[in-house]
Amino acid sequence: MTVRLAGKGNANILIDYEDPVWLYRCCIKYPDSIQKCNEYTYNNIQFINTRMIPLLKDLVCPMTLVNVPAKEIYNIYKDYVDVNCADSDIIACLRIPNLRPSKKYSIRVQSDHLTKIYTTKDNHSVLLEIKPKWLHNPTPYCRNCTDNSRKNRNIKYCYSELLQDINQMRLIIETERKLKIPQQFIEIITKYFIDKENVLQKLHDIQKSLHCDDGFKTPSQDNKDINDIQTLMTLRDVSCFIEWDQTMLSITDLKVNVVDVDLKSIDKMTYWKNTQSILDKYQLKVVH
């Protein structure tokens, strides 16, 4: 069986066993210990099951915890974690659907920090992959657009604004890209984001209900603040996959999955506070 790397993030890799349907997601946060990586995966799936699924329900991409013998994926995993260490001979993985099979979605129409759009060669299917980030803004300025400005990202649209102004879709799918994307998709995705049950609206409402960071002041250790902050920061960093094909005539036919719903370490509190301080002091804030 051929094993290959299908994707890599800061904390996880995706492994493909030549199965067009499933991928295996493995933690690489602790390069010196498989066991520490496994413990994170066990804690992560518990967090997803107890915190994310109750909030997002069936929008959460389905996943199953599986233990894979380390030797089966040695050639891939050894580049990120020392598989020769003696603390575990199994690797805890999350088995997840392959939401973007490369053989199917072989044409990338758009790619920037927040949005990727793929189509099939016959143009009968479209996959929209988005990172909406902060949809509820607790500050007077738009956090996403201000951060994009600070980092010199030339992104003209805003997913937070899309909740109020459907014309943002024209900026997301610019004129030259419309020629490469089926008009039926543009029409149905526009209707979807007008509908108040769309995934962005749900994420916004949950983010708003959990707004507890108050400038990321250090939370009490004896209340639920820590869990709420971790959950909130997770919801500000998810990705959404929306898939359409020409048989889908209604917005209810669209396949919508939310991924990257991973547990955020409270150790990142200092980083979050520092980033917020930098943005608060940034002179060219974006206000909608």
Image: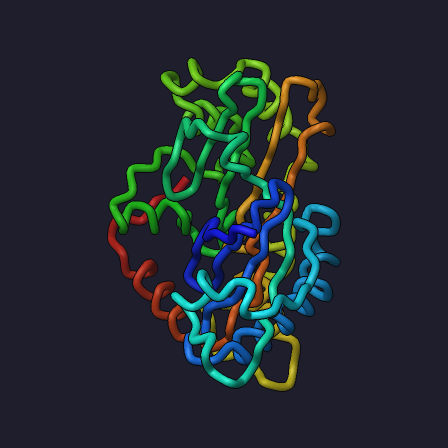
Residue 184 or 168: which is nearer the viewer?
184
| Residue at image coords 54%, 14% | 183
| Residue at image coords 45%, 62% | 75
Quadrant of the image for the C terminus? top left
Measured along the vertical axis of the image, is residue 195 above or below residue 183? below
Residue 2 or 202: which is nearer the viewer?
2
Residue 165 or 41: which is nearer the viewer?
41
Is there any visible trace of residue 12 in the rendered image? Answer: yes
Measured along the vertical axis of the image, is residue 2 above or below residue 276? above
* Residue 235 position within the rendered picture, expressed as x and y whole percent measured from the top left: 57, 56
| Residue at image coords 51%, 38% | 129
Q: Is residue 27 left or right of residue 80?
A: right
* Residue 49 position within the rendered picture, expressed as x and y whole percent measured from the top left: 72, 63
* Residue 241 position within the rendered picture, expressed as x and y whole percent measured from the top left: 57, 40
Q: How is the image coloured?
A: rainbow
Residue 197 or 287: which is nearer the viewer?
197
Q: Is residue 100 left or right of residue 149?
A: right
* Residue 1 position within the rendered picture, expressed as x and y whole percent measured from the top left: 56, 52
Is there any visible trace of residue 269 in the rendered image? Answer: no
